[in-house]
Image (cartoon, grey):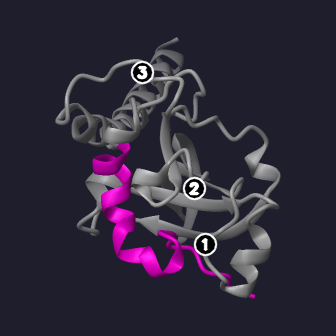
């Protein structure tokens, strides 16, 4: 009986540590967003839709942002970047830019661990998205931005375009010559 109790306690502690770690990144992003004002409901005019089925899209690239990175607090984790069929030709050709309206990039962000010298995908931390619509999102380079906590479509973190400017677009501004995207095609 004591063996089972010890195993159960160990499991609960592991889950608690994993939850705390996943929450830290989301709290960091939520903290950034909350510094601009209270999070409100998303206005219908600014709404960026959740990219259902994005894991069936083209995988652009991946990266791991470790605790050693200066941006770890904001975007730490294992990132797998996807693009939909609308944006794939522009990505593959490296232009011409801008991307066509309807292009969507999705970033599937997960916790990760190192096991036997390999990085292993863990719990989902967030899904971030860029949606191209030049008229609707003219103040942010033609891109709408959104982040969903835990990848849950009912938990958006960016309340409107004004918050998207500070929480997302500021980091993308240096990529203006590449239509504000960081992704490049690697054959």
Q: Residue at x 28, y 69 (%)?
A: 69
Name the residue beneath numbered marker 2.
Answer: 134
184 displayed left or right of 150: right
x%, y% of residue 61?
A: 63, 72
Distance (Cα) linking label 1 and label 3: 53 Å
x%, y% of residue 84?
A: 76, 58
Query: Can residue 116 be seen?
Result: no
Front-lying residue, 117 or 186: 186
Q: Is residue 72 magenta?
A: no
Name the residue beneath numbered marker 3.
Answer: 9
Q: Main secondary structure of the magenta part?
A: helix
Q: For the residues labelled 1 and 3, say whether their Cβ atoms are less than 8 Å apart.
A: no
144 displayed left or right of 90: left
Vertical comparison of 95 with 173: above or below: below
Q: Residues within 10 Å of mark 1 (few under 14, many from 20)?
A: some
Q: For the residues labelled 1 and 2, say whether their Cβ atoms are less than 8 Å apart.
A: yes
Toward which corner of the image does residue 4 lie, by quadrant? top right
Name the N-terminal-most of marks 1 and 2.
Answer: 1
- Magenta stretch? 164-187
53 displayed left or right of 72: right
Q: Residue furthest top?
A: 1
Q: Residues within 10 Å of mark 2 (few under 14, many from 20)?
A: some
Q: Residue at x 48, y 40 (%)?
A: 147
Name the N-terminal-most of marks 1 and 3.
Answer: 3
The residue mark sitting in front, 3 or 2, is 2
x%, y% of residue 89?
A: 79, 75
Q: Is residue 181 magenta?
A: yes
Name the residue beneath numbered marker 1.
Answer: 98
Vertical comparison of 183 with 21: above or below: below
Vertical comparison of 1 with 33: above or below: above
The residue mark sitting in front, 1 or 3, is 1
């Amino acid at each position: 009986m004591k063996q089972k109790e010890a195993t159960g306690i160990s499991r609960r502690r592991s889950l608690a540590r994993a939850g705390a770690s996943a929450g830290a990144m989301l709290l960091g992003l939520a903290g950034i967003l909350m510094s601009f004002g209270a999070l409100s409901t998303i206005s219908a005019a600014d709404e960026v839709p959740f990219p259902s089925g994005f894991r069936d899209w083209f995988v652009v690239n991946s990266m791991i942002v470790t605790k050693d990175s200066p941006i770890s607090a904001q975007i730490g984790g294992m990132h797998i970047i996807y693009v939909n069929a609308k944006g794939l030709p522009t990505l593959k050709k490296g232009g011409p830019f801008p991307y066509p309206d309807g292009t969507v990039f999705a970033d599937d962000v997960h916790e990760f661990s190192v096991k036997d010298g390999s990085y292993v995908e863990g719990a989902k931390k967030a899904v971030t998205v860029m949606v191209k619509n030049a008229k609707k999102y003219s103040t942010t380079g033609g891109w709408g931005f959104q982040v969903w906590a835990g990848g849950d479509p009912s938990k958006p973190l960016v309340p409107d375009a004004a918050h998207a400017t500070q929480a997302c677009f500021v980091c993308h501004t240096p990529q203006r010559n590449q239509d504000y995207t960081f992704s490049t095609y690697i054959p």
